[in-house]
Image: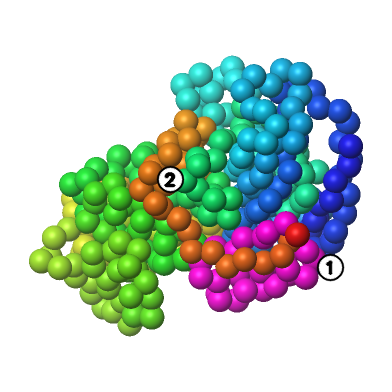
Amino acid sequence: MSFKTFRGSPSGIKESTTKKLSLERDQVLVKVTHSGVCGTDVHYKSADMVLGHEGVGHVEEVGPDVRELKKGDRVGWGYEHDCCGRCKHCLTGWETFCPERKMYGMADLDQGSFASHAVWREAFLFRVPDALDNESAAPLMCGGSTVFNAMVVAGVKPTDRVGIVGIGGLGHLAIQFANKMGAHVVVFSGTDSKKDEAIKLGAHEFHATKGAKELKTEGDQKLTHLIVSTSGLPDWQLYLNVLDNRAIISPLTVSDKPFTFPHQELIVRGLRVQGGIVATRQVHREMLAFAAFHGVKPMTVRYPMTEKGIAQCFEDLEGGKMRYRGVLAAE
């Protein structure tokens, strides 16, 4: 068994071939139709590995221990590929924190969604609901999973006021999820250029932050949650004025810089900073069902799954031109 893949390298994306022996245990061969392109893919584009972790396609073949999936089923997968199944994190439904977890970029480097096919365990594949087409489902496998998980872990309720910083690949999905959860959604972006889109996506308030010395929300009502989805960490001092006491801050920015926050404010106001990554499998399933039922879909730009198409997608993503999720479509 062999199939086409696209690997990262110091000189750019290269078409390659992955060979795989016959399927074992609960392994499933998936024919990829679409792959989302995530900021994390950019981080690994120079690594010698098959790229992509927002894959969607159809089951083509199943291993001997597969229980539910069958040929032709539509499935997708995300950032995590496997876990030990024995530790306290796995046994309490938090397998994303398993010490032996297998994650994108750290394991299974010969598999990815920038490919014609991929082989994954049935236990880490997700059925795509009928109401979601494959192109829309692909970016939900990581982008949607990440923002939905942040809201679940932080305990967002319909009575909450949720601030969302940044309208990009994550932020535009966060707006939709928070709105459909019934929350009052307050969006912060550098300029007014995305205001109309933010309102259409479900924002109830919009505030431009560039050059602002102080932020205020309508009626001066404070935020119970702040979800940060920008590429760089914000000036936390600027947002303190709009946060309610005991507010929960969910920073989703990927950064290797130290996290610094006004310490005294954190203590005396009971603020909470909640870390989080992609969703556990059960939350991931719930995210897909929620998105399908409420019509939450990413705004996508389609590219062909070729060396040229991938390179153009990366160029647009890194150049800040993407609105809002790139999707590679198999030819």
* Front in this rendered view, residue 67 or 237: 67
Q: Which mark is residue 11?
A: 1
Image location of residue 21, percent across then percent down: 88, 31
Number of numbered discs = 2
Residue 177 included in the magenta stretch of the image: no
* Residue ID at (40%, 66%): 166
* Residue ID at (33%, 42%): 154
* Residue ID at (22%, 56%): 184
Identify residue type, mark 2.
Answer: Ala
Q: Quadrant of residue 256?
A: bottom right
SS class of the residue under badge 1? loop
* Residue ID at (72%, 39%): 30
- The answer to whether residue 11 of the structure is visible from this angle is yes
SS class of the residue under badge 2? helix
Whichever of labels 2 and 1 marks the residue nearer the N terminus, that label is 1
Q: Quadrant of residue 85?
A: top right
- Between the residue at mark 2 and the residue at mark 1, the CA separation in whole angstroms equals 39 Å
Q: Is residue 110 left or right of residue 297?
A: right
Q: Quadrant of residue 28?
A: top right
- What is the span of residues highlighted in magenta in the rendered image? 306-330
Q: Is residue 147 left or right of residue 14?
A: left
Image location of residue 82, percent across then percent down: 65, 30
Identify residue type, mark 1.
Answer: Ser
Q: Is residue 110 left or right of residue 113?
A: right
Q: Is residue 261 above or below residue 279?
A: below
- Label 2 environment density (alpha carbons within 10 Å; few <14, some 14–19, many ≥20): some
Q: Which mark is residue 292?
A: 2
* Front in this rendered view, residue 280 or 55: 55
Q: Is residue 257 left or right of residue 304?
A: left
Q: Which mark is residue 87?
A: none
The quadrant the C terminus occupies is bottom right
Judged from this view, the residue extending furthest toward the left is: 219
